Image (cartoon, coloured by chain):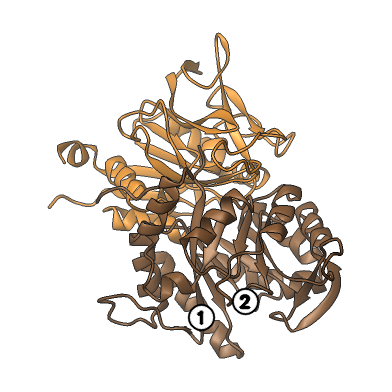
Amino acid sequence: MLARRIIPCLDVRDGRVVKGVNFVGLRDAGDPIECAKRYSQEGADEITFLDISASVEGRSTLVQVVEAAASEVHVPLTVGGGVRVVADVRTLLLHGADKVAMNTAALQNPDLVADASARFGSQAIVVAIDAKRVSAQGERARWEVFSHGGRQATGIDALVWARKVCELGCGEILLTSMDRDGTGLGYDLELTRRVAELASVPVIASGGVGGPEHLLEGFVEGFADAVLAATIFHDGHHKVAEVKAFLHAQGVHVRLTEPH
Amino acid sequence: MSVPPRTALVDLGLGNLHSVARSLEAAGADVVRVGEPSTLRGFDRIVVPGQGAFRDGAAALEAGWRTPLLEALHGSTPLLGICIGMQLLFAESEEAPGARGLGFIPGRVRRFPKNLGCDPKTGAPLKVPHMGWNQLSAASSLLGEGTYYYFVHSYFCELHTAAGVATLGTSETEGAGSVTCAAVAHHGIAFCAALAQGPLLAVQFHPEKSHHAGARLLRSFLRPEAASAQ
């Protein structure tokens, strides 16, 4: 049976982890490769790098980070941020990314999803959706998709967009609740479940995790295939292995790391 | 210290070989990327990796890889097929009607059906691609019963035997002895996750992405004697 996945996410700018990762004994907490190695040793099922570099130089640094990480970290790597055209996808895949996430570019040019999926296979293409609840209280729930790192409203309904990107051929959806992101209040479970139920492809829940119980909710109430979290792992309060033991005890099927 | 096995990494032009090359090196291989079909000779090990589309793999076979790969499969060099490298052993795939695989293993490559059911623990619907870590059952000792490996695929290999369609069991390959389903995985349905036939091992999952379990398998493939002595 397929295990539910736990995915730590590292924000990277100009080749460095933006928010320091608080690992005991890590020589360089800002080094994305060191962090990724540590997470994979602790049982992370995949690692996601999201590049938030503003400059062209920063982006080219990302390619080097991906190449070094893929050499040393033998779990799947998803890389996103700044992907504009098919050539960007190709560059990241050739340097060792297993999956490439696209967000704004897919909204501006949905054909990019179809082209990249046809060229590299659906399994390599992730569409990241940043969604914000726009319905008033008491109204039927609605979420709008935002682009440009959440700065720009698109007028597109998140559920409609999720269905569309599945039709276009993406292999996975990375779904972030903008309302919950950074709050520590837990995922937007209604959003997650609605998308997970309509999407034909796996859905990764993101945004709002404050503790292991939120990951459990993401699976059991949100129907997520995978859960992504950053802060709870980075701040050193929760280890991936410990979180997995908790989920296992709660009846969720996870890959418990083998003794090595 | 023994000499690292010279390992041909077959480059069918399907994309990134970086991860699989690094993982093989970490497991002790002397990796040589082979992009020219006529040079696939004299190696200690052959690895046919693959991600991407069956049609592109079949096109690479037409472009010159068919004969050297079939010769290798009929030879005695241990050969590891990964993902599309496993699927290309079959004659055809539902992914690309009309595209010709190697036809070395009897059966065909099929797409996961719709409505695979739900995860029994969380109730979430099962999705395609089958993406993530899954546990093997009915696995050979080399692969490890209950071991988790990383899968990412929408199509799976359906092995045919004299008795009909089989997930488990043994079948005759054309002039090359019997093929065995070496492991089963479950994703709504049970499917053949690995097959073995003489010096051939083919796996649907990605050892190069399967952390310690994958590294152990690659070491065993490269040095069976060292692995069994551990």
Q: Amino acid at mark 2?
A: Gly
- Chain A painted colour: brown
Q: Quadrant of residue B40?
A: top left
Q: Which comes sooner in the sequence, label 1 or label 2?
A: 1
Between A222 and A152, the residue placed more toward the observer is: A222
Q: Is residue B65 left or right of residue B2?
A: right
**Residue at 74% from the left image edge and 84% from the top image edge:** A151
Q: Give SS at disc 2.
A: loop
Q: Amino acid at mark 1?
A: Val
Residue placed most toward the observer, A247 or B33: A247
Q: CA distance from mark 1 to mark 2?
A: 9 Å
* Residue B27 image point, x, y percent: 29, 53
Give how far across and how far down residue A247 sits, in percent. Answer: 45, 51
Q: Which mark is residue A55?
A: none
Which residue is denoted by mark 2 in the rendering?
Answer: A81
Viewer-nearest residue: B72 or A48? A48
Labels 1 & 2 near each other (Cβ < 8 A): yes
